[in-house]
Amino acid sequence: MSAPGTAPSAGGGANAPAATPLGVTPRRVLRSEWIKLTTLRSTWLTFAVAVALMIGLGLLMAWLTVGEWASMTEVERAQEQAGQRVLAGRLFAQLAIGVVGVIAITGEYATGMIRATLAAVPRRLPVLWAKLGLFGAVTFVVMSAASFAAFFAGNRILAEHWQFSISDPGALRVVVMTGVTLTAVCLLGTALGFVLRNTAAAISAIVSIVLVLPILGQVAPRVAQYLPSGAMGALVTPTPQPDVLAPWPALLLLGAYVAAAIAAAVFTLTRRDA
Amino acid sequence: MIEVQDLTKRYGDRLAVDALSFTVRPGLVTGFLGPNGAGKSTTMRMIAGLDRPTAGRALVNGRPYAEHRAPLREVGLLLEAKAVHTSRSARDHLRALAATHGIDDRRVERLIELAGLREVARKRAGGFSLGMGQRLGIAAALLGDPATVILDEPVNGLDPEGVLWVRTLLRELAAEGRTVFLSSHLMSEMALTADHLVVVGRGRLIADLPVAELTARETTVLVRSPEAAVLTGHLLAEQATVAAVEQGLLEVGGLDAAAIGALAHRHGLPLHELTPRRASLEEAFMELTRDSVEYRAGVAA
């Protein structure tokens, strides 16, 4: 603690940080958000959980499938497709990734940090773009790696009875799209966090979208294919199926959902008081 | 320099800030004073572009806050203690804010030192006391070496040493030619720190005047005399106002102590006490805001 009365000048003159022109730039906002991301343990823990679920459940599913071999019919054995079982961890990893996306912003609203953030970047939108870009990019890199790891490691277990390869029809797309759909969940989470400004509310919303709606959708598969979960499911389905969208329309639909959520976030962030 | 022009904020049917206009000049410590709920924090948030005014506008150093290319360089803000992510360390918090303006780590370290946060810089800000949170907030406010500093209740929760530190710091910032604007609901704190006062109540401007002017008004003299009744007659003849406080004790307005002493001497009246009584700032403040306190103690609704 500094002793009373000895406070040196707060800055001023020669020691002022005037060496480089000071000003807010998109790069600097991105750098700031990177510091925020890397200095919160909760973010990394949640990413670790997502990776563990993605790979761990993939291996577990592969192992259980191998165990079922003896009791499966010929038809059932032939129905197994590349990447179906070993990437099943996606369904659980998306919950953790949704949380990562949500707390990227709701943590700031919960603590009041948002006012410090927006005072530093009063134009506000650069903060939204930086968070979406950064969390989206990190999720894509981390979860794509996890997806490839789950695919190759899982298939080594399945290799006892099934010979799957990344060059099988649709296999590479399914592995890549697993990373893409998880990135979409992260972006949806962040956008919902900006709109709702509350951790519990935003997590409930993202869980509803990825978990609850698809369960309700089971009664009407024809409608359910157009839900965000339907679009994501279509992207990780290796070969065409009834009531499942083709990959390109599914990707466009998912992109539209993400864009709509981001538009709502832009509206909330720019119009509402901080 | 802060220029507030007809600033108004309405929440539903409640006017939190009602056509407020005032100017905060550089080189002075200006106190923003008013009872709790008078609209001080809302006004400060609007100045900082965090809340959108219903009407009117606020300019900082000649422009709306949001239009500055390097806002931290123009304005240092402490709007509430602990506008900090609780899980992040004090140093990382400052680094993240500094990064938005390309402010380097040396400056961050300097402010950690200045604010007396060296010992706790690596600790989670969530575990900070209110006083430590205030110090961190002040360090954050000074990151960009701003020409204008806006602080909402900066001494709230500080220990006496911290209060003295803030007071000294603010006086130095003003002496360097910066604009210093701080709010408080405590007149006594303002008396020690501020040069100028902007007083608000129920969102309206009540007074905008130098501290010295506020304390100078309403001076009375306490006069104790065994001949109080006789003296009262002579005082009234001199156009003074006289109030009997108790048996043999008068409170006299309109004449200073020297004039009263001379008057008593001329008429051969003994005096036992002659005490000039300056209205304290608290009294002056209570007087000013009497009609605008939102919830008055002891008044049944």
Image: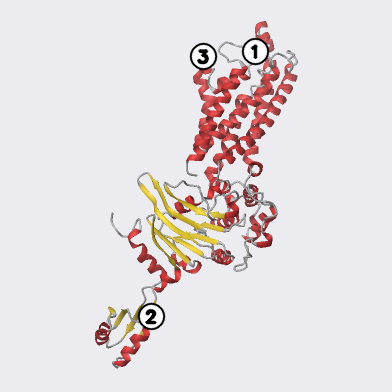
Q: What residue type is labelled 1?
A: Thr
Q: Dot 1, crowdedness within 10 Å: few (<14), some or many (≥20)?
A: some
A157 versus B284 height, above or below:
above
Q: What residue type is labelled 3?
A: Arg
Percent of width and height locating residue A36: 63, 43
Which quarter of the image is occupied by the N terminus of chain A? bottom right
Residue at image mark 2: B276
Given contact means CB atoms under 8 Å apart, are the residues at marks 1 and 2 in contact? no
Q: Which amino acid does label 2 sit on?
A: Pro
B102 versus A146 height, above or below:
below
Percent of width and height locating residue A244: 57, 14
Mark 1 falls on what kind of element?
loop
Mark 3 falls on what kind of element?
helix
User: The residue marked by circle 3 belongs to what chain?
Assistant: A
Residue A239 has which mark? 1
Tags 1 and 2 both on a single chain: no
Question: How far apart are the two marked residues, 3 and 2, measured between alpha carbons?
Answer: 90 Å
Residue at image mark 3: A222
Q: Dot 2, crowdedness within 10 Å: few (<14), some or many (≥20)?
A: some
Question: How far apart are the two marked residues, 1 and 2, measured between alpha carbons?
Answer: 97 Å
Answer yes or no: is residue B155 visible: no
Question: How far apart are the two marked residues, 1 and 3, measured between alpha carbons?
Answer: 18 Å
Q: Which of marks 1 and 2 is in front?
A: 2
Tags 1 and 3 both on a single chain: yes
Answer yes or no: is residue A258 visible: yes
B218 versus B76 height, above or below:
below
User: The residue marked by circle 2 belongs to what chain?
Assistant: B
Percent of width and height locating residue B17: 40, 52
User: The residue marked by circle 1 belongs to what chain?
Assistant: A
Label total for image: 3
Depth check, front residue: B288 or B175: B175
